[in-house]
Each structure stands twice: as structure tokens, then as C-alpha cells.
Image: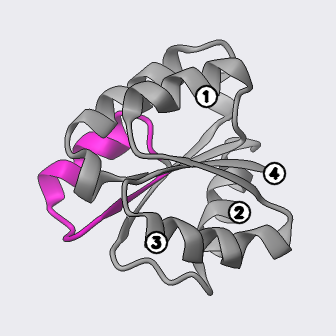
Amino acid sequence: MRLLLIDSATSENDSLCAALEPHGFTVSGCGELERAKELHLDRPFDAVLIDATRQGIHGIDFCNWVRALPDGDRVAIVVSLAALDQKIVTEYLSGGSGDVLCCPLDPRTIRFDIEAALHHRTM
């Protein structure tokens, strides 16, 4: 399972990678949305985890961009926010995110959230 982690906090990336890789995830990380697009076009990911706390409203554009691609509807998108602002949550869900989580993410349970989003995408 290929997962793209869009976040600029290296320490968080490292802990999430360490938690996910033993469960069959191959995690690639980047801190910029344009680089994320390049990586996804080169070899599409099964799932994307966006830290909207750092990417802000621009992460919604990324969700819409993925959804517009051929087979973009098969990519599971999970978004994390510092606080569950209803307006932002609604915009992300409308933009194609399958789930919105509140930070901090728990490395012990994040795989279940990603697996659930993947399951919903294949239904």
C-alpha cells in the first residue's frame, strides 16, 4: 500500500512512517503540494494523508486535483487539522477527502483511519 504523507514536520513524518511501515505501508513524504503532485503523477498513491494545519486551504485544491485525475476516485484521502473547524471540515469533505482527523495524530491508530478510508474507496 503506497501512502503519500504531505506534511512539513519531519519528526512527525518519521514517527508515522515507523508506525505504518510494519503494517504494509510504503510511505513517501513531502512538504509541498506541488511536489506531491509530481510524485503522484509519476506513480499514483493508494492513499494520501494531508496535514491541513500546515497546508491550509490549499490542501482542498490538492484533493480536487486528485479527484479530477483518471482513477482519482480510487485514492483514499485523509486530512488532519489542528482543530475541527466545521467550515474547513465541510470544504475538505466536499473537495474529496474521505476523512478528517484532529491533530495530534496517534501513530498507533492512524493506520486504522487510513485503512478505513481505503476500504470506503473500493466499495
Q: Position of residue 103 (x, y in %)?
A: 33, 75
Element on which disc 3 rests:
helix
Q: Which mark is residue 39?
A: 1
Magenta-highlighted residues = 78-97
Among the 4 quarters of the image, the one containing residue 57:
top left
Q: Amino acid at mark 3?
A: Glu
Q: Are marks 2 and 1 in contact (CB under 8 Å)?
A: no
Q: Position of residue 65 (x, y in %)?
A: 44, 20
Q: Are marks 3 and 2 in contact (CB under 8 Å)?
A: no
Q: CA distance from mark 3 to mark 1?
A: 20 Å
According to the picture, the residue beneath numbered tag 3 turns out to be: 12
In terms of sequence position, does the residue under pointer 3 or pointer 4 come before the other? 4
Q: Which mark is residue 115?
A: 2
Element on which disc 4 rests:
loop
According to the picture, the residue beneath numbered tag 4 turns out to be: 1
Q: Amino acid at mark 2?
A: Glu
In terms of sequence position, does the residue under pointer 2 or pointer 4 come before the other? 4
- Select label 2 or label 1 by which is in front: 1
Among the 4 quarters of the image, the one containing residue 44:
top right
- Select label 3 or label 4 by which is in front: 3
Q: Pick whichever, 120 or 28, lies toward us.
A: 28
Q: Are marks 4 and 1 in contact (CB under 8 Å)?
A: no
Q: Amino acid at mark 4?
A: Met
